[in-house]
Image (cartoon, rainbow, N blue to C red):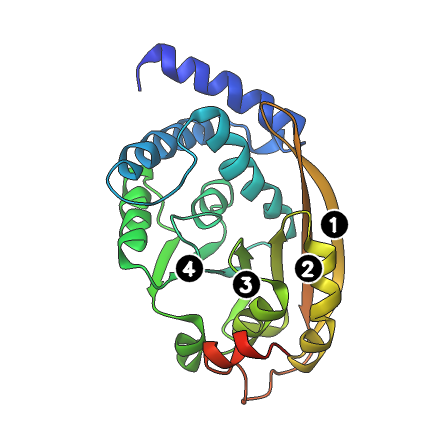
């Protein structure tokens, strides 16, 4: 990225972070890291499917700001699991703006995790780890092992809750980053959340400001009140066929 491109990146970055009320994370160091990440993401997406967003005016609001907004929900020093992290969102943005936490990215696609590890090296951040496999299988070794479990754009909440809540420590939280259908998904997931040991603590509706307008978002924070029964999670086929 040359100087002109970097200045344009900074202009968009400053504007988007200000409009979305996350300017506290708009520091010179963070700008530099996000610029490196954006350039590397675009470069690698030309080789294999990491993201459909391949311009700065889309990546900054819809990958960076959209993820960083969730940083406020995460307590100091937390051990965080991102289920279905894909190309590293929200894993990498959260790790950049919250160096006090450790973020584990979980995905079944090794190439995408390879990108995350390589990006973390380029960004010189040491608070990112990756786990390869399916959530319902890896939970056997990491049940109730995380302070925070977060997931974005993976599945409907009645399916996602069964994949995520078993990883959460009692007293921790599961954070579901949802689009405009979040409230509808929550209504159909309430019974399952209770069975899995969770309780809805907060539902936050807001608009994410982009370069061309706004998009509806709903962030759902679910507190883990009690241990998840060992019968859960089931195999994914059973979860999908008959959600709780």
Question: Which of the marked residues, 4 or 2, is nearer the chain's N terminus?
Answer: 4
Q: Residue at x 42, y 32 (%)?
A: 34
**Residue beneath disc 4:** 104
Mark 3 near mark 2, Cβ–Cβ under 8 Å?
A: no
Mark 4 near mark 1, Cβ–Cβ under 8 Å?
A: no
Left or right: 70 as drawn, with respect to 96? right
Quadrant that contains the C terminus: bottom right
Left or right: 133 as drawn, with respect to 12? left
Q: Secondary structure at mark 3?
A: strand
Q: Decide which of 51, 242 is in the foreground and name it.
A: 242
**Residue beneath disc 2:** 221
**Residue 232, above or below 202:** below
Disc 4 vs disc 1: which is toward the camera? Answer: 1
Quadrant that contains the N terminus: top left
Disc 3 vs disc 1: which is toward the camera? Answer: 1
In the rendered image, which quarter is residue 106 located in? bottom left
Disc 4 vs disc 2: which is toward the camera? Answer: 2
**Residue beneath disc 3:** 149
Residue 173, can we see it? no
Disc number at residue 204? 1
Disc 4 and disc 2: Cα gap in Å? 19 Å
In the rendered image, which quarter is residue 227 located in? bottom right
Q: Position of residue 110 (x, y in %)?
A: 27, 59
Question: Which of the marked residues, 4 or 1, is nearer the chain's N terminus?
Answer: 4
Q: Secondary structure at mark 4?
A: strand
């Amino acid at each position: 990225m040359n100087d002109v491109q970097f200045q344009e990146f900074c202009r968009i970055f400053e504007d988007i972070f200000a409009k979305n009320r996350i300017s506290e994370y708009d520091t010179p160091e963070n700008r530099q890291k996000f610029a490196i990440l954006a350039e590397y993401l675009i470069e690698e997406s030309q080789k294999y499917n990491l993201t459909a967003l391949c311009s700065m005016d889309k990546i900054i609001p819809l990958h960076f700001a959209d993820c960083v907004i969730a940083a406020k929900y995460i307590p100091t020093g937390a051990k965080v699991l991102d289920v279905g992290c894909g190309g590293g969102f929200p894993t990498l943005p959260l790790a950049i703006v919250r160096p006090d936490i450790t973020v584990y990215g979980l995905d079944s696609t090794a190439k995408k995790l390879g990108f995350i590890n390589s990006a973390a090296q380029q960004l010189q951040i040491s608070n990112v780890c990756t786990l390869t496999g399916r959530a319902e299988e890896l939970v056997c070794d990491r049940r109730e092992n995380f302070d925070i479990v977060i997931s974005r754009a993976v599945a409907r909440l009645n399916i996602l809750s069964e994949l995520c809540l078993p990883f959460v420590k009692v007293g921790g939280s599961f954070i579901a980053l949802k689009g405009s259908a979040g409230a509808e998904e929550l209504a159909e997931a309430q019974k399952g959340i209770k069975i899995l040991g969770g309780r809805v603590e907060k539902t936050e509706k807001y608009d994410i400001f982009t370069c061309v307008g706004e998009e509806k978002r709903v962030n759902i924070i679910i507190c883990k009140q009690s241990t998840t029964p060992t019968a859960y999670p089931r195999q994914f086929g059973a979860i999908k066929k008959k959600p709780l």
